[in-house]
């Protein structure tokens, strides 16, 4: 099973890019973030024509998450992260696909920090850890896939000081990510590529793609029951260089 995560950064605008990648890469499951589409405007017909079933939760202008499954219909489990009934942002969806639970996570950016947006990020992380702990306790096969908006270590960002005050690399953000891993989750990309940067995001500004000035923000965490099945992992980085591309590239894993 090949599971991918891809921050598409506007699914309707990037639909040709997405469809071309789906045809070429042939993932079995895809977690999408930043749909920037209402539920009604989600391009269901085009996705189905490409051979994928889908569940999604949209939001006008911002956010939005989806899970696609090749030649299958994902079974929706939930479309919001538990723990705050007042949080109406479309940042989490969870579905079962062929015996595996897959999430699509779009964790808050948190900028500017310090401030309310950073507090929201850390609280969202706390809620995610609480929810993820139940998966560990129940020994469920899970892939926590998504855009975490955290570059976990210095290896996960190009050499620079220009991001030093950014929420993506703050000690509290990195500690929250480490605390999640400490439950028993395996960071698939970093486990199979321990010394390579494996960037997934290159900002549109300041010529960062041509300079390979990237960050690793998109992660696939596998639960203990799935970890022995982890076979391959990678980044389809050339997708970032295509015309009309998202500022993210797809990250993926293969499970035996």
Image (spheres, rainbow, N blue to C red):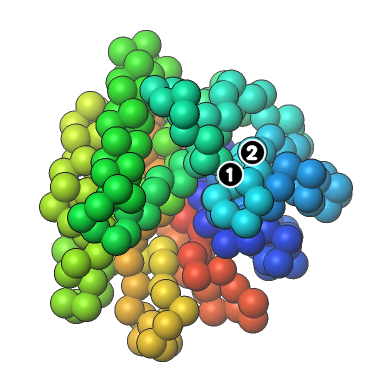
Q: Earlier in the sequence, mark 2 or mark 1?
A: 2
Q: Secondary structure at mark 1?
A: strand
Does any portion of residue 94 appear in the rendered image?
no
Q: Is residue 32 above or below residue 8?
A: above
Which residue occupies 52% across, 40% down? 89
Rendered residue at 73%/32% (across/down): 72
**Residue 129 or residue 118, whichever sits in front:** 118
User: In the image, is residue 29 above or below residue 131?
Assistant: below
Residue 120's spot in the image, x, y percent?
33, 42
- Residue 232 located left or right of residue 183: right
Disc 2: CA contacts within 10 A as few (<14), some (14-19) or many (>=20): many
Q: Position of residue 247 (x, y in %)?
A: 50, 70
Residue 138: image location, x then y, percent: 37, 11
Quadrant in the picture for residue 178: top left
Secondary structure, mark 2, is: strand
Residue count near mark 1 (Cα–Cα under 10 Å), binned few <14, some 14–19, many ≥20: many
Residue picked out by circle 1:
65
């Amino acid at each position: 099973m090949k599971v991918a995560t891809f921050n598409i950064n506007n699914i309707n605008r990037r639909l040709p890019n997405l469809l071309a990648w789906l045809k070429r890469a042939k993932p079995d499951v895809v977690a999408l973030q930043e749909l920037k589409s209402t539920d009604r405007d989600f391009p269901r017909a085009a996705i189905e024509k490409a051979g994928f079933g889908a569940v999604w939760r949209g939001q006008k202008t911002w956010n939005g998450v989806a899970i696609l499954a090749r030649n299958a219909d994902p079974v929706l489990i939930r479309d919001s992260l538990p723990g705050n009934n007042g949080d109406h942002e479309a940042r989490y969806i969870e579905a079962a696909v062929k015996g595996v639970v897959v999430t699509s996570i779009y964790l808050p950016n948190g900028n500017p920090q310090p401030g309310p947006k950073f507090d929201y990020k850390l609280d969202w992380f706390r809620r995610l850890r609480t929810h993820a702990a139940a998966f560990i306790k129940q020994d469920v096969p899970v892939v926590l896939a998504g855009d975490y908006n955290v570059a976990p270590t210095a290896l996960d960002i190009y050499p620079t000081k220009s991001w030093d005050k950014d929420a993506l690399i703050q000690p509290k953000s990195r500690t929250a990510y480490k605390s999640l891993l400490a439950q028993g989750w395996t960071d698939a990309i970093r486990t199979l590529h321990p010394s390579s940067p494996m960037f997934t995001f290159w900002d549109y500004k300041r010529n960062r793609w041509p300079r390979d000035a990237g960050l690793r923000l998109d992660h696939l965490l596998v639960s203990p029951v799935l970890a022995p099945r982890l076979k391959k992992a990678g980044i389809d980085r050339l997708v970032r260089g295509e015309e009309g591309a998202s500022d993210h590239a797809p990250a993926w894993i293969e499970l035996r």
